[in-house]
Image (spheres, helix red, strand yellow):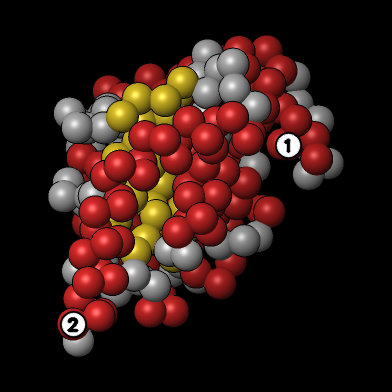
Amino acid sequence: MSIIIAVDGTAASGKGTLAKQLAAHYGFAHLDSGALYRLTALAVLQAKGDPGREADALRGARAIDLSMAGDPAIRTDVVGQAASKVAGIGAVRAALLDFQKDFLSHPPGGSPGAVMDGRDIGTVIAPDAAAKLYVDARPELRAHRRWLELKSMGIDRDEADLLKELMARDAADKSRPISPLKPAPDAALLDTSDLGIEPAFAAALAMVEPKVRPHLEGLLKDRHRG
Ligand code: CDP
């Protein structure tokens, strides 16, 4: 059994950065599940399909090329909005489920564990995760972070527009009937509004470590015995 850390939260809350840092800290594999929905959305947009139409979205989900997960083309806000649309379609979520479950049960590279970030990791994909975080921050700060991120990619957007889009996407993600964004009952809540990258990581680690440590010690004992 692999050791799973689930990191869910709102758009641009810092969950991706935290998930990557936690994975590096523990030597675990990392998967940004949002990239799966973004890749699906990109495939639909490239095929001139409608992200809100089940047949188009499902075709996109089946066509995704994981080697594109690091492509900046999926990070744009246009793709983010379309990702939120395909993500509301049950058939798309079902099509992406096995990949996520396999990743968690057999993390690549033989890692003893995996960190996955998204919207429904602690609630649906891995309800038995060893540790769960729910990350949030004030919307204005998240919009500013997203503005900076897009600017670094050469995309200049109006920050007020980004704020509106981000709040609309959060509202859609929280209110959809299938796998809505909400904290799992056993998730630790982390507000990164007033925390820089390092303090946010320290806070996340303080929440996760007591849950993960016993599993790591169990693994070590097993190895010793074996
Ligand atoms: O980076 P950001 O937080 O803006 O978005 P993301 O994590 O890349 O996710 C993009 C969209 O995919 C979200 O708005 C969700 O609608 C959807 N998503 C989801 O439904 N379930 C997940 N596990 C991950 C993302």
* Element at label 1: helix
Q: Can you say which quadrant of the picture contains the N terminus?
A: bottom left
Residue that numbered label 2 is attached to: 225
Residue toward you, 177 or 123? 123
Identify the amino acid type marked 2.
Arg
Q: Earlier in the sequence, mark 2 or mark 1?
A: 1
Q: Residue 80 location, x and y as percent?
A: 53, 39
Amino acid beneath label 1: Leu
Q: Quadrant of the C terminus?
A: bottom left
Q: Residues within 10 Å of mark 1 (few under 14, many from 20)?
A: some
**In the depicted structure, whether residue 144 falls above or below residue 221:** above
In the figure, residue 26 lies in which quadrant? bottom left
Residue at 55 percent across and 31 percent down: it is 200
Point 59% across, 22% down: residue: 195
Relative to 83, 214 lies left or right: left
x, y percent for residue 138: 52, 14
Q: Kindly identify which numbered label has been placed on residue 48.
A: none
Q: Is residue 149 left or right of residue 37?
A: right
- Farthest residue, direction bottom: 226
